[in-house]
Amino acid sequence: MPPHETDEPLVARHVLEFPGGYTRTTGPVIGRFLTELRAGRVVGVRTAEGRVLVPPLEYDPATGDAVTDEYVEVGPAGAVTAAAWVPEPRAGHPLDRPFAWALIRLDGADTALVHAVDAGNPKALRPGTRVWPVWRQNRTGHITDISHFAPEVTRIVSPVRPEYRIQAGGALRVFLDGVRRGVFLGGRCATCAKVYVPYRASCPECGGAMEEPVELPDTGTITTFAINNLPDPRAPEVPFVSAYILLDGADIPMIALVGGVPAHEVRQGMRVRAEWLPESERTLSMANVRWFTPTGEPDAEL
Amino acid sequence: MRDVAIVAFAQTRHTGHDTGLSETELILPVINEVKERTGLRRFGFTCSGSCDYLAGAPFSFVAALDALGAWPPISESHVEMDGAWALYEAWVRLQHGDVDSALVYGFGKSSLGDLRTIMTLQLDPYYLEPLGLDQLSVAALQAAALGADRAELDEIVRRSRADGRANPYALDLPAEIPDGFAVEPLKTCDIAPITDGAAAVVLAAGDLAARLCERPAHIRGIAHRTEPHYLGMRDLARSASAAEAARAAGAGKGPIEVAELHAQFAHEELILRRALELPGDTIVNPSGGPLAANPVMATGLIRLGEAARRIHDGTASRAVGHAASGPCLQHNLVTVLEA
Ligand SMILES: [Zn+2]
């Protein structure tokens, strides 16, 4: 005999399969259940002692006696009695995304049905959670005619997105004209002399009329700020900082983004300056100010 | 009732992977070992336990008969179950009174296929198997129904692995317990490892037992009970059938020094302890149990063999061997062994 060339093991792939699957007779009890499933109903069978078995068995598991021929429609909803979460579904599983297996006591049943629940996350299925069947469109009389169960509807998401066309009024128009030129326009109250920015038509404190707009520098001091962790289409990234900035010469802070500095380094009293878009890109919009960025000066006393 | 005793037990050094040995090659050494230990070359009856689905070949147990010396024809039978039920059948056969010895063996190589999916085939073909309900999902449903304390489960895993490392036949599993869920709430560490292996036991009746073994492990009680297979028809947090089998076998009629439990998942040990009403001072699974080596279809027989071994070597005078079958401890066999 020639010597073995290698020590590689002799391995073959092997599959056990009956072509087309096994044909099984159902008998009258299981057959009735599956026939009702095909019609979109779930039935249980009543035992001689009056309990309703779902799914039906030919015998009462408690006594071994034959069940009655009384079928009772149950569910379709039910309550979960125990659940197990499958983080990585296997090839033969009913859902291809993470899901739960659950014991479900359908309304009117005395036993629990085992099925899959599309629960979304492992914490969603506490004992007692109500679930409803999700039916397959083309039913054939098979336990999988119920594709899976899904938790009862307890909340909805309502997207709201009406669209509007708005026009900037007089005072805002004045302010945005300034922003397009690269200056912040404020208004001084003719009565109490407070300076407001953005420019406005009247003093919110005393009701006095505004004098002519005054030009304010684009430097100021952060009076307070927030670190935002929810994305906003107007912000550069998450997290971003929005701050109240008291422009030099103003009495009322203005809200704006702060950038060019790590969020955790932003502080009250920090001196900042507006970073403008190039003149050619400016429009009648606050977007002309990319954000306020630290000037590097010592912090101001607030 | 005829007095029947376990007089010899042998098992393979189980592996967590396919070593390339055929089933016959796996069995041959353990059968030779019990033959040598007893001096018997022929047996009044032979019975084996295995599962064709593990090898994926019909009648694969027939090929394994080559390890026996089956000519001239021997009196032989097979159960498509754990070898523990083959032992039960052999015990019943010995009760007939016309033969005095029996050879029992069980074997399985769960490394060959995907055991978790293969075990789906044990479920009913109408309600459960078509859902693709796999072995770990079934066990996780039972763990969820039980709602056991995590620290208690971790302690079972830790103890089983430590005992397994001290057992030359069990797997050498790391002391460090991995984290992570297989199917929540079942953690990967709660699951018996994939294992290949085999075991053999010799039963002897009457006077023959004392001639073959210095300290036979007499079967003082043996009983098995089963429950409805459909999971939703029973209280999964309890094992009524294990409790009933233990009562029928007389487990509670005396102190149980050692109990070898066929718990393939950590939470099953808690359910079985309660069902068998084991007191706190009973030593459970000193071999490491199935969590340290789980050669499917031999694991239950090994529980009986390990319990008997404690009688043989004098470390116990009364022990219980338990075997389980079916989803979520559906079917339980309890054996009470005494010196
Ligand atoms: Zn004023």
Image (cartoon, rainbow, N blue to C red):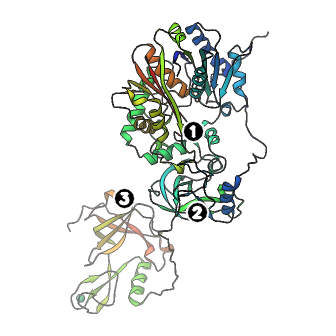
Marked residue chain, label 3: A
Q: Nearer the viewer, residue A269 or B142?
A: B142
Q: Nearer the N terminus, badge 3 or badge 2?
A: 2
Which residue is denoted by mark 2 in the rendering? A133
- For badge 3, the amino acid type reads Val
Q: Is residue B180 above or below residue A213?
A: above
Q: Nearer the viewer, residue B305 or A62?
A: A62
Left or right: residue A140 compared with residue A248:
right
- Tell me the quarter of the image containing the C terminus of chain B: top left
Left or right: residue B66 compared with residue A71:
right
Give me the residue at 43% from left, 45% from top: B146
Secondary structure, mark 3, is loop
Asked if labels 1 and 2 share a chain, the reply is no
Q: Nearer the viewer, residue B28 or B168?
A: B28
Q: CA distance from mark 1 to mark 2?
A: 28 Å
Secondary structure, mark 2, is strand
Q: Is residue B280 above or below residue A172?
A: above
Callout 3 touching callout 2 (CB < 8 Å): no
Asked if labels 3 and 2 share a chain, the reply is yes
Q: How busy is the neighbourhood of tag 1: few (under 14 within 10 Å), some, or many (20 plus)?
A: some
Marked residue chain, label 1: B
Which residue is denoted by mark 3 in the rendering? A261
Ligand 1's quadrant: bottom left
Q: How busy is the neighbourhood of tag 2: few (under 14 within 10 Å), some, or many (20 plus)?
A: many
Give the image location of residue A272, x and y in percent: 32, 66
- For badge 2, the amino acid type reads Pro
Which residue is denoted by mark 1 in the rendering? B326
